[in-house]
Image (spheres, rainbow, N blue to C red):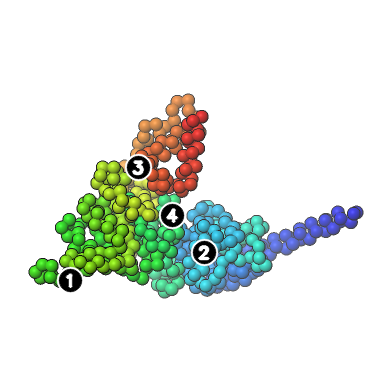
Amino acid sequence: MSEAPGREAETETGAGAQHLDKLRAVLNICRRMSAMTDLSSLQALITREAKELLQADRVSIFLFDRDHCELWSAISQEGKIMRFDARLGIAGAVAMTGRTINVVDAYQHPLFYKEVDVETGYQTETLLAVPLHSLDGAVIGVGEATNKLGGGAFTPEDAEILATLAARLADVFENSAIAAELKAQNSGRATYPAAQFISGFSTQNIVGMSHRIESIIRLIDQIRSSSVDVLIQGESGTGKELIAKALHFNSPRAKHPFVAVNCAALPEALVETELFGIEKGVATGVDRRIGKFEAAHEGTIFLDEIGDFSLTAQAKILRILQERSVDRIGSRIPVPIDVRVIAATNRNLEACMREKQFREDLYYRLSVVNIQTPSLRETPEDIPILANHFLQKHCATLALEPKQLSPEALERLCAYRWPGNARQLENEIKRLVASVRGRIISEEHIAIPAEPKTAPPASGATPAAGQSLSEAVEALERRLIQEALQQAGGNKLKAAQILGMSRGGFLKKLKKLSRAGEA
C-alpha cells in the first residue's frame, strides 16, 4: 500500500515529460516554419512532421478566398489544388464562425461535406478543424487534421497543438516570401483544370456569406441526392434562378436538361402550346413541336414568376404535377414525363391564396421544399462581396484593367437600400466600369441617392420608459416574430426562414416568449 503514492507520482512525472516533449516539438516546428522561404518545403514540414506530432493520418491547410466564397487547399496530401464552397462542410463552418470543431464520426455530423471525400477517394472518420486568424482577427484559413491514428478522437491537447501551429502558419502566410507564392497560385484560379474543383460545386455563382445565404447553400447540399419539387419566393433581383440552377446541377438530374420558362411573358393563349406542345396539322402550316415540359424530360423545368399565371393556367400545371404526363394540342395520347419542377415568384403566394388568386392545391404541390431568398436590405453584409464580385466580372468581360472601389464609394453602396436588389447593384457596377476611366471608383462616381440603409425605427422599437434592457429585447423579439408570422401567413417554417432561424430555434423562442407572456 505504501508504494502506490510513489507509482502515482512516477506516472504524473511521465505524463509531464511527455507533454514537455510535445511542447518542444511544437516550438521546433514553429521555428522552422518561420525560416521557410518556399511553399513546397512548408508543405513537406506540415504533411510529415505536424501530422506525426498530432498522430493524424493527414494534416491539411485551406485558405479562405472571401471574394469567391471559397476554401482552397494551400497544403494537402493530394498535392493538387482543390476548391469548394466555403459555406459548406466542417471546414466551411470553422471559416465562417472562427471556432474550432472536433468531430468523432464525420459521416454522422450534419455539417460534413461528403463531396470532398468523393473527389479524393479518401474516407474521413475523425476530424479536427481550427481557424487561422490574421493579426486583425479575421479568419484567413482553416487547419485540418483527419483520422486519429490508433482509433479514438482527437484530444483537447491536439486541438491546442493544431491551433498553435495554425497561428504561426497564419503569420508565415501573411508576412513571408511564401505569401507571394500563395497569391500567385490563387490569382490563377480560372486556369485550373475543372477536375481540381470539387464535384457538384455549382453554388459558386450564389455570392454572399450572410447567415441567410449560408442557410440556403446548406439546404441545397442537404437535398442534393433527391429530386423533390421546390418553391423559391423572394423579391425581384434576389437570385432565384441562380438558386434553381444550383438545385438542378447539384441533383441526380444534373446531366439532363434545365429548361427555364418565364411565366410572366407567356400570353394566356400560348400557355398550352409552349408548355405542352402541339401536333402537326392542328392548323395550316403548323409542324409538330414538343413543349417545355417534354423538353425537360429526366431533367428540371424552372417556372419563373409562376404567381403571374392565371387560375386556368394554374389548373393545367396542377394536372401535369398530378399525372406526370402531358397532352399535346391535337393529340389524344398522353406523353409520360419524368421532370422535376422548381417554381419561383416575387409574389406573396400565401396572400394570393387568401385573395383566391392562387390555387392552394398547386401551392402545396410545388412547395415540398420552400426557399425564401433575402433582399439586400436584409443582408447588408453581403453588399461589399457582391459589389467586388460584379466589379471583377465586368472588368474581365470588357477586357479592362481591374478597377477598385474607394472605401467611401463602398460605404455609399452599403448605405443604399437597393429596391432592385442584386440585379440593380450589378447594373450600377456595370455602369461604373463602363464610365469611370481611372482605376479608382470614388464616391462622386456613384449615381444612386445617398440615404441610410436602415429604415427609421418602427413604433415600439425603442425601449419604453422604465423598461429594463432584457424587457426591451424581449418586446423587440416578440414584435419581430409577430411580423414574420403575419408575413408568412401563419406558417412557422416560413416565418423562421424570414428571420434567418432554424425551425427548431424559432419554435423554442416562440414557446419561451409565450411562457413569458403568460407570466
Give the mark nearer the N terminus: 1 vs 4.
4
Give the mark nearer the N terminus: 1 vs 3.
1
Which residue corresponds to the image point at 59% horizontal and 72% vertical from the top-left?
44
Q: Quadrant of the N terminus?
A: bottom right
Q: Give, as a three-letter code, the residue at label 1.
A: Arg
x then y, percent, for residue 197: 44, 69
Which residue corresponds to the image point at 36% horizontal and 44% vertical from the top-left?
488
x then y, percent, for residue 15: 76, 59
Q: Are marks 2 and 3 in contact (CB under 8 Å)?
A: no
Label 4 belongs to which residue?
A: 214
Q: Secondary structure at mark 2?
A: strand
Q: Disc 2 versus disc 3: distance between alpha carbons?
A: 43 Å
Q: Give, as a three-letter code, the residue at label 2.
A: Phe
Give the mark nearer the N terminus: 1 vs 2.
2
Q: Nearer the viewer, residue 456 or 323?
A: 323
Label 3 belongs to which residue?
A: 489
Q: Are marks 1 and 3 in contact (CB under 8 Å)?
A: no
x then y, percent, for residue 360: 30, 48
Q: Disc 1 versus disc 3: distance between alpha carbons?
A: 44 Å
Q: Determine the residue located farthest toward the right in the rendered image.
A: 2
Q: Disc 4 versus disc 3: distance between alpha carbons?
A: 25 Å
Judged left or right of residue 349, residue 509 is: right
Q: Nearer the viewer, residue 124 or 133?
A: 124
Label 1 belongs to which residue?
A: 288
Q: Secondary structure at mark 3?
A: loop
Q: Disc 4 versus disc 2: distance between alpha carbons?
A: 19 Å
Which residue corresponds to the image point at 72% horizontal and 60% vertical from the top-left?
19
